[in-house]
Amino acid sequence: MRFNVNDLLSKKKQAQKITMLTAYDYPFAHIVDEAGIDIILVGDSLSMVVQGNDTTLPVTMEEIIYHTKIVVKSTKRAMIVADMPFMSYQVSVEEAVRNAGRIIKETGAHAVKLEGGREILSQVKALTEAEIPVIGHLGLTPQAVLRMGGYRLQGKTEEQARRIKEDALRLQDKGAVAIVLEVIPSELAREITESLEIPTIGIGAGPYCDGQVLVIHDLLGLFEKFTPKFVKKYANLKDEIMKAVKQYKEEVEKGIFPDKEHSF
Ligand code: KIV
Ligand code: NA
């Protein structure tokens, strides 16, 4: 049985932490699933860590669908959540429902994630009424990078903090099943977490959230353009891969590979 929306709520009730990581393809999704991570996010971070873009804005519906299909196929246990791409839900409620419907129907994903608060409440309500589970995303919302003028801490002023708290309650009220809180002060995340019945999943939001999420390329040391303060590198795979590739190159050039053992 896969982790599902009921498990989200019961983990929060039992004060058990929810684990979430991104994956975009078979090798990573397979490992993350086998490791027992509860939720796999096919994030629009795809744009940055797989496609090499500077923001998440260029990712398309077709690209999210392509990668989400692969991730669903490659896993057995995790709940699979797909990010709705920039401009796939902002224009109208109708477009949001049609696009979320495509993602669920064509990929087999179990929920979609949308960025924003009061601006997208009618979308969250309509998706929920269409039986599509919605995860919210507040605080640093990367699709708003142009308005925010960069990726920085959100919810610093009292007014900003109040707005995020209100948005969290409103998203819950419209049917969101969980909310990702990105790069906000730990104390604000704690207050929000305590005020909600649905779980919060933090990234750069401190230890008091009901769960945590990271981008897998960050955690593995595979994304080197920049490393935010909240990222902990649990491995340095870039160095490992570099070592292997250089050794292969050297062995081919020197005629060491292939040897007898690897030849017919
Ligand atoms: O796209 C993504 O990877 C995300 C997580 C960082 C929450 O939205
Ligand atoms: Na995202």
Image: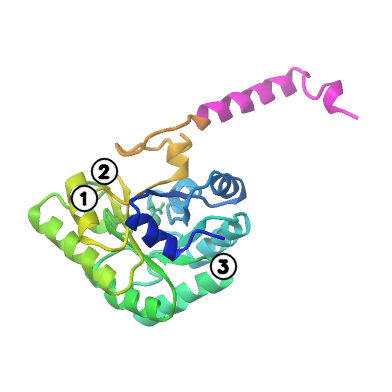
Disc 2 within 8 angstroms of ligand 1 (CB): no
At label 2, the amino acid type is Gly
Mark 3 lies on residue: 108
- In the picture, which quadrant includes the C terminus? top right
Give the image location of residue 85, x and y in percent: 42, 64
Q: Residue at x 48, y 31 (%)?
A: 235
Mark 1 and mark 2 lie on one chain; the one further toward the N terminus is: 1
Q: Which residues are magenta?
A: 238-264
Principal secondary structure, stretch drawn in magenta = helix
Mark 3 and mark 2 lie on one chain; the one further toward the N terminus is: 3
Q: Is residue 259 left or right of residue 79?
A: right
Residue 257 in the image: above or below residue 115: above
Give the image location of residue 112, x and y in percent: 43, 66
How far separated are the C-alphas under marks 1 and 3?
33 Å
Mark 1 and mark 3 lie on one chain; the one further toward the N terminus is: 3
Q: Is residue 209 left or right of residue 21?
A: left
Per the image, label 2 sits on a secondary structure element best described as loop
Per the image, label 3 sits on a secondary structure element best described as loop
Tell me, for residue 190, which label it has, or none. 1
Give the image location of residue 221, x and y in percent: 46, 34
Give the image location of residue 147, x and y in percent: 23, 58
